[in-house]
Image (spheres, rainbow, N blue to C red):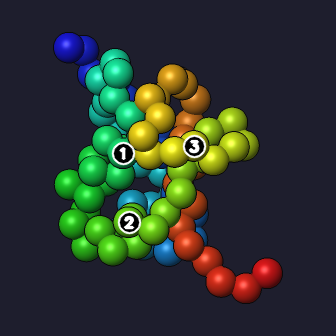
Amino acid sequence: MDKRAIKIICFAGLRKYFGSETTVHVESGDNYSVIIDGLKAINPEATEVLTSCRIAVNEAFVSLGDPIKTENAIFLIPPSSGG
């Protein structure tokens, strides 16, 4: 299968591991959990924070089990505290 590159925009503490954006390659039919797994492979030190991140696409959160349907940038939101 052909792989395509998906741009991942990172916020807050994730920038320590990946900078402000990075790229993950996915295949047709992959779900969003593949992105988390791909990022863990790129930087295993980020595993702990990645397990509690949420993914947003088009200003809405998606489930890790949802299939990737977009060519748009994907936003990776780490946990945060405060208001």
Q: Is residue 10 left or right of residue 60?
A: left
C-beta proximity under 8 Å, tags 1 and 2: no
How far apart, in angstroms, are the residues tagged by discs 1 and 3?
10 Å
Q: Position of residue 15 (x, y in %)?
A: 47, 67
Where disc 2 sits, the SS reads loop
Q: Position of residue 25 (x, y in %)?
A: 30, 33
The mark found on residue 33 in the picture is 1
How far apart, in angstroms, are the residues tagged by discs 2 and 3?
15 Å
Residue type pointed to by label 3: Val
The mark found on residue 51 in the picture is 2
Q: Position of residue 20 (x, y in %)?
A: 51, 58
Residue located farthest toward the bottom when viewing the structure as drawn: 82
C-beta proximity under 8 Å, tags 1 and 3: no
Pick whichever of labels 1 and 3 is earlier in the sequence.
Answer: 1
Q: Is residue 76 above or below residue 67?
A: below
How far apart, in angstroms, are the residues tagged by discs 1 and 2?
10 Å
Residue type pointed to by label 1: Ser
